[in-house]
Amino acid sequence: MTQKQKALSKEEEILLQDFSRNVSTKSNALFYGNAFIVSAIPIWLFWRIHFMDLLTSSPLFLIITCLSTYLVSFAYKKTKFVLKHKVAVKREDAISREISKMIAEDKKMNKKEKDERVLWKKNEVSDYEATTFSIFYNNALFLAVVIGLSFFLLKSFSPSFNYIFSVGLSSGLIALLSTGTK
Amino acid sequence: MDTWLKICIVVVFAVATTGNEEATPAKLLFSKQILNKYLVEGMDIVIKYSLFNVGGTAALDVQVADNTFGPQDFEVVGGQLKVTIDRIPPGSNATHVVVIRPSKYGYFNFTAAEVSYLPSEDAAEALVGLSSEPGQGAIVPFKEYDRKFSPHLLDWLSFAVMSMPSLVLPYALWYSSKTKYEAILTQKKDK
């Protein structure tokens, strides 16, 4: 009974992980780190091209970068969750074949153990692909929108307001788009 | 008939000689123009001075002086602000160009330059005149001009280099996993 409970809880754990919106600490650190870097990149443009003074504008840069970091990492998490299930469905067959090939010679392993391994591998691969694609997609969208807003739509604004609105609106937009279910 | 012709010739000569004795003194029209489209702090401004002699006699000892550009606000880069032209024949013109560089930004009132000249050879006193006034101009700060017009190629290149890791790395990682599992599927299909 106890072993069955343990086996069930292990399966449940994998399933819970699969369907959960929560990310692990490692993923969190990865997301926040990437979000901070990509949020800080536009500072270069505003310093060199819009001639914002680094020292006098540093409090503004800090506040907006922190806000943008939070919104971009939010977008990463939401996008990852949506993508993960799509990737899991796509990769299921390939992963099953890979696991089958790996454990072909191990006759001690029963079907249940094999299924568990497939489920675990499927979770790992879909998590990995969803994470990397989510980061790439949101970074590309964020930078494109920042450039579009600051050099086209908002170019007549003063540099400070240009920075606030272009970075703020870009990060807000990708956060909003990430809440879509498709 | 011959008599009439001779009388006509005499009259023409008389008119010609008296015309020379009553030639109008020299009269100069003086204009000052700013040739720049944009006035920018630390960048050259080209000023063109044009003198037109609309009188009947040559203007002599023409002295042009522009005292409106103080040394604390402007630096003379080319030409001189005080020039002497020996002679401007009647019906002709003379031009002079000066290149200056403003050291400060802000609104500046471009006022008239002065000219003095002798209207004839036997004139006792020189005539003094003023040029046209270009009026008020805004000298913009260099930052504003650079922000608007500089291509910033190096800055954009640096931005591209900085953005590459955030874009290329995640894409490469995703792509390698994707191709790996798609290859497993296609291998099985081929078998």
Image (cartoon, coloured by chain):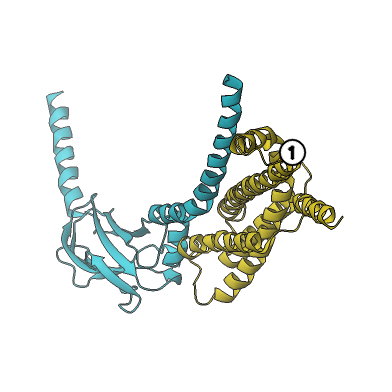
Chain colours: A yellow, B cyan
Give the farthest residue toward the bottom: B72
Residue at image location 58% in from the left, 61% down from the top: A39
How crowded is the residue under tag 1: few (<14 C-alpha within 10 Å), some, or many (20+)? Answer: few
**Quarter occupied by residue B115:** bottom left
Query: Pointer 1: what residue?
Result: A111
Picture coordinates of residue A69 (x, y %)?
Answer: 64, 63
Question: Compared to A99, does B143 lie above or below?
Answer: below
Q: Name the chain letter of the residue that bears numbered label 1.
A: A
Task: Say left or right for B186 vs A78.
Answer: left
Nearer to me, A95 or B159 = A95
Secondary structure under tag 1 reads helix
Residue B186 in the image: state x and y as whole percent.
58, 25
Q: Amino acid at mark 1?
A: Lys
Find the residue positioned furthest to the right. Answer: A1
Tell me, yes or no, if residue A7 can be seen here: yes
Residue A151: % across, % down: 55, 53
**Residue at the limit of the structure toward the top, as seen here:** B190
The C terminus of chain B lies in quadrant: top right
Please identify the quadrant where the N terminus of chain B is shown.
top left
Quadrant assignment, res B81? bottom left
Tell me if I can see residue A165 in this picture: no
Residue B181 to residue B109: above or below? above
Image location (x, y in percent) of residue B18: 18, 49
Seen from the viewer's position, the closer of residues B173 and B24 is B173
Instruction: Please say if A31 is above or below B112.
Output: above
Q: Is residue B26 left or right of residue A154?
A: left
- How many numbered dots are placed on residues in this image? 1
Q: Residue at x 64, y 35 (%)?
A: A100
In the drawing, does residue A118 fall left or right of residue B145?
A: right
